[in-house]
Image (cartoon, helix red, strand yellow):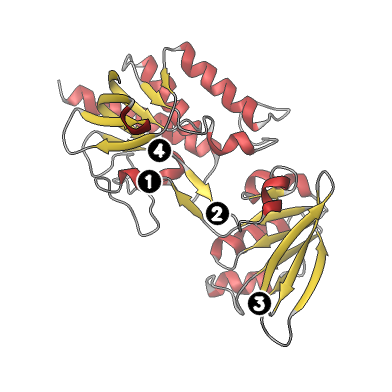
Amino acid sequence: MTELSTKCLIIGAGPAGYTAGIYSSRANLEPIMVEGIQPGGQLTTTTEVENFPGYPEGVTGPKLMEDIRTQALRFGLRTVGGEVTEVDFSKRPFTVKVNGGSTVITADTAIIATGASARYLGLPDEERFKGMGVSACATCDGFFFRNRPVAVVGGGDTACEEALYLAGLASKVYLIVRRDQLRASKYMQTRVLENPKITVLFNTNTVSLFGNDILEGAKLVSNRGTEEENTFDIAVDGFFLAIGHSPNTEVFKPYVQLDEQGYIVTEGKSTATNVEGVFAAGDVADPSYRQAVSAAGMGCRAALDAERFLLMQL
């Protein structure tokens, strides 16, 4: 068993975590980061990023995360591979076990930056075309489908927002809704139903996706299990999932306050949680924006909040 200690433990290795690493390292907090099973977070599955400041020609997701990680390491961030499997936030210093206890870390403060995972339909083709037409973020990837047909899956406010956003870029938008009505607010429903570029397919499910090297279309079924059941194809270059995200907060549930969706609740405009000395940053505490740049900004704030908290303890 390896035992480590730090003034500031960062859990999660996306834009929020690495930015917190940069700021806490420069503040001489000698931070340790547990990088998790996917260092770099969701951005490592993104092919092209064009909306992160400082990259006028765009950058791939993996390259962006490699650059941020390199910057954090330059200032002295220490990293530990593996996944946090148990925490004890009942008293300070906090205790965190990695990989079932093969590494145990004690920390005066902790920054949770474990992100949120997009929910997928579970089709084998989703993985095959991920980054090649399949996406869970219209704001991130919609630009690549200008004047091309796309589909959005979902019936809530998020799905409607994505469909409306894409309607401003794409040639046509199919909104695939498994129920017979939208769950979105009346205002959002009206905007979607009145948009000439959006075709809403009610009572419809996705059977599979198809294409050669890149996505070319989707096979759908309407009115499944009824006499009116009908299987048909739509030609789309982009397929956007908007059926929600699952914040990666399970291990923190016994201690940290979560909202009804499982996102960490922070106090006011700060990144502080209900546990003194524990802070949250990025998508794990942000169900609204889910952008790399906003996550990075929140990572900065969390590191500053942790630094100020430690100064108050002197």
In the rendering, which numbered label is found on residue 109? none
Task: Using the numbered discs, state the Cα–Cα distance from disc 2 to disc 3 in whole angstroms.
Answer: 20 Å
Q: Residues within 10 Å of mark 4 (few under 14, many from 20)?
A: many
Q: Are marks 2 and 1 in contact (CB under 8 Å)?
A: no
The one of 261 and 189 positioned closer to us in this rendering: 261
Identity of the residue drawn at 47% across and 26% down: 18
For the residue labelled by badge 3, is the local secondary structure a helix, a strand or a loop? loop
> Is residue 287 visible to the viewer in this orientation of the structure?
no
Q: Which residue is mark 4?
A: 281
Residue at 73%, 81% (x, y): give it.
229
Per the image, the residue denoted by label 2 is: 119
Determine the residue located farthest toward the bottom in the rendered image. 227
Q: CA distance from mark 3 to mark 1?
A: 33 Å
Residue under pointer 3: 203
**Which residue does the numbered mark 1 point to in the structure image?**
249
| Element under disc 2 | loop
Q: Position of residue 187 (x, y in %)?
A: 56, 72
Q: Who comes first in sequence, dot 2 or dot 1?
A: 2
